[in-house]
Image (tube, helix red, strand yellow):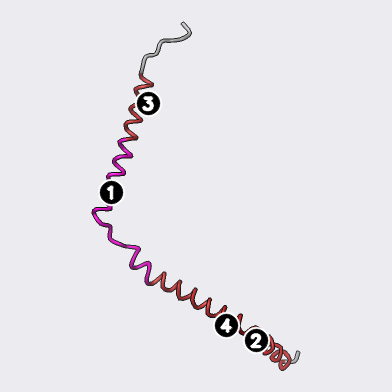
């Protein structure tokens, strides 16, 4: 194989498609910078973000409402099951 021939065909290929390769290279750099920024900037700042008392209070209220509803519905089911119904087949 002639290296000069390969080199010439590579030069022709790159001269025809240099815009595409430039756009792809810029896009690859932007994606790489995004990954680096996510890993070293976004994660340390927002991963261990302090939770405020107000947000915890709202969460506790919602949890308490759910547990109240659950215990009430459980009590209703127990009341229904514990009733003495007359036997319809007697």
Which of the two discs, 2 and 3, sits closer to the camera?
Answer: 2
Q: Is residue 9 above or below residue 49?
A: below
Tag 1 and tag 3, C-beta contact below 8 Å: no
Q: Quadrant of the N terminus?
A: bottom right
Sequence-wise, which precedes: disc 4 or disc 3?
4
* Label 1 – label 3 distance at C-alpha: 29 Å
Q: Report the residue marked by disc 3.
A: 77
From the top left corner, tell me how far across and down residue 29 is, in percent: 50, 78
On screen, residue 6 above or below 79: below
Mark nearer the N terminus (1 vs 3): 1
> Does 65 lie within the magenta span?
yes
Residue 83 image point, x, y percent: 36, 17
Q: What are the residue bounds of the magenta stretch?
A: 41-68
- Does dot 3 land on a helix, a strand or a loop? helix
The residue identified by callout 2 is 14
Q: Which residue is mark 1?
A: 58
CA separation in Å, label 2 and label 3: 76 Å
């Amino acid at each position: 194989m002639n290296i000069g021939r390969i080199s010439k065909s590579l030069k022709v290929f790159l001269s025809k498609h240099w815009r595409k390769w430039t756009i792809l290279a810029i896009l690859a750099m932007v994606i790489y910078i995004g990954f680096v920024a996510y890993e070293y900037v976004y994660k340390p700042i927002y991963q261990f973000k302090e939770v405020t008392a107000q947000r915890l209070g709202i969460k506790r209220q919602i949890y308490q409402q759910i547990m109240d509803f659950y215990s009430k519905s459980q009590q209703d089911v127990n009341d229904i099951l514990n009733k003495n119904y007359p036997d319809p087949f007697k």
